[in-house]
Image (spheres, rainbow, N blue to C red):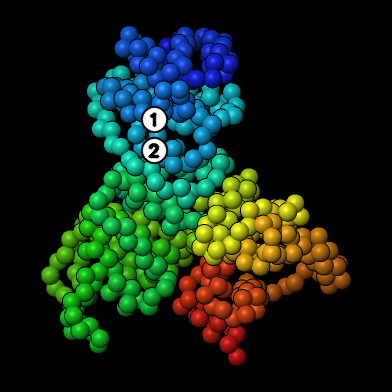
Amino acid sequence: MANILIIEDDEVFSELLAMHLEDLNHDPQRAHTLEQARQLLALNIPDVILLDQQLPDGFGIDILKEIVKLSPHPPVIMITGVSDNTLAIQAMGLGAYDFIRKPMKEIELDTTLSNALKSHRLSRQVSAVTDSQEYQVDIGQIIGKSSSILDICKTIGSVASSNAPILITGESGTGKEIVARALHHHSGRKGLFLPINCSALAENLLESELFGHEKGSFTGAVALKEGKFEQSIDGTLFLDELGETSTALQAKLLRVLQEGSFERVGGTQTQHTNARILAATNRDIKAMVGKGQFREDLFYRLNVIHIHLPPLRERMDDMPMLTEHLLVKINHKHHTNVKHLAENAWHRMKAYHWPGNIRELENILTRAAVLARTETVTADLLALPDKTEVSEADAEKATSSGPRLISLDELEKEHIHEILLYTRWHKGKACEILGTSRPVLDRKIAKYGLDS
């Protein structure tokens, strides 16, 4: 039997929760305000605390900051209907044991509670001091209420303040840089957040951008230049599309991760950095290691903590929130006034596969908002294929001639060509949809002879 404190202003929900805990042979106590909670905590420290965010005399996060200063402090499970993902990040960063969003399933609560009690029993055997840091939450870019997004936010909150490298994976357009920025924002680091796209520069230029160069080290090096590793001291360096780097450059990155030291291009003096390294890729790095295309030692150095972003098609429950957020952004940026999506537009969006993920969604909504003559976007403005028409056409083709037996290169060539035609050969827009960089797209165009 455990002593559990419920801090919840909804008396009906609080009573139901207490009854459920009693059925599990626990001893629940209830507080409906922060003041009542503080009075109960002054008398007795419970084994676990179930904490709501919205309370009559303040916010749950405020008392969480007080609870985590206890040594050892009881596990705090935040149970709230607040949909702001930054609250989950902040709560986990401050030391909450877990974060559950209402409405919840009993099995979810029971499992989390059981694990929290085990953790508390172990914590009584050691002495630990938790330093609480207050974070100013002013980012709201991680949009969604799906379980996968909530798990990502909880991970961000748990690991942001560490110095460990983090590998962020996911398809192009899933928001890897947004996650990296959230990690930096909640890390407490006072230095800069510096992103660099490793696929956007030729190897010699990328090396110079990362490590800097000495005056006269190569043609055009007319002055000494500090690289990103020097510029991000006390900050965060985000290496996007790391899978596009050569094994030679990977060896130099490995040294920085191991020793925190490097030399500028053309230099002999050793430089030092304490930048926190975050890396991202849309490629299967583990498979690349097996093929000898990526250094195994660098992979394990980077993969200390792994955050994977699911594609949009696997989190379609987040589509309404994402769409609302993007329309506000689009209206502000392009001076449009779109506020609604027609029912047929919703059906079309839900049926689409979204290979370009959130980046493609923003592109499609931007086009629709600019073309819309009213506050409502209709299906014809979305420039998305009709699922019924496409499936019937594919079925007819398959019935008459069987599957198309073409190589992956040929399939890639056709897809890039279709996107280029769709964007009227606007390479910048094509790169956004394809989720690639201009140099990579130019190489693909030359490889497949599309420019001819």
* Residue in the image at 24% along x and 63% along y: 231
Q: Amino acid at mark 2?
A: Gln
* Tag 2 residue: 90
Q: Residues within 10 Å of mark 1 (few under 14, many from 20)?
A: some
Image quadrant where one finds the C terminus = bottom right
The image quarter containing residue 211 is bottom left
Judged left or right of residue 263, residue 62 is right
The disc at residue 125 is none
Depicted 256 relative to depicted 121: above or below: below
Between 33 and 145, the residue placed more toward the observer is 33
Determine whether the residue tagged by mark 2 lies in a helix, strand or loop.
helix
Residue 181: x %, y % from top left: 39, 53
The image quarter containing residue 195 is bottom left
* Residue in the image at 36% along x and 66% along y: 196
Is residue 24 something that shows in the picture? Answer: no
Residue 24: x %, y % from top left: 54, 12
Determine whether the residue tagged by mark 1 lies in a helix, strand or loop.
helix
Is residue 56 something that shows in the picture? Answer: yes
Q: Residues within 10 Å of mark 2 (few under 14, many from 20)?
A: many
- Alpha carbons under labels 2 and 1: distance apart: 8 Å
Q: Nearer the viewer, mark 2 or mark 1?
A: 1
Depicted 151 relative to depicted 397: above or below: above
Depicted 27 relative to depicted 358: above or below: above
Residue 130: x %, y % from top left: 27, 30
Q: Amino acid at mark 1?
A: Ile
Residue 282: x %, y % from top left: 49, 61
* Residue in the image at 30% along x and 55% along y: 236
Q: Residue furthest bottom?
A: 452
Between 175 and 8, the residue placed more toward the observer is 8
Depicted 30 relative to depicted 378: above or below: above
The disc at residue 61 is 1
Proximity of marks 2 and 1: CB atoms separated by less than 8 Å: yes
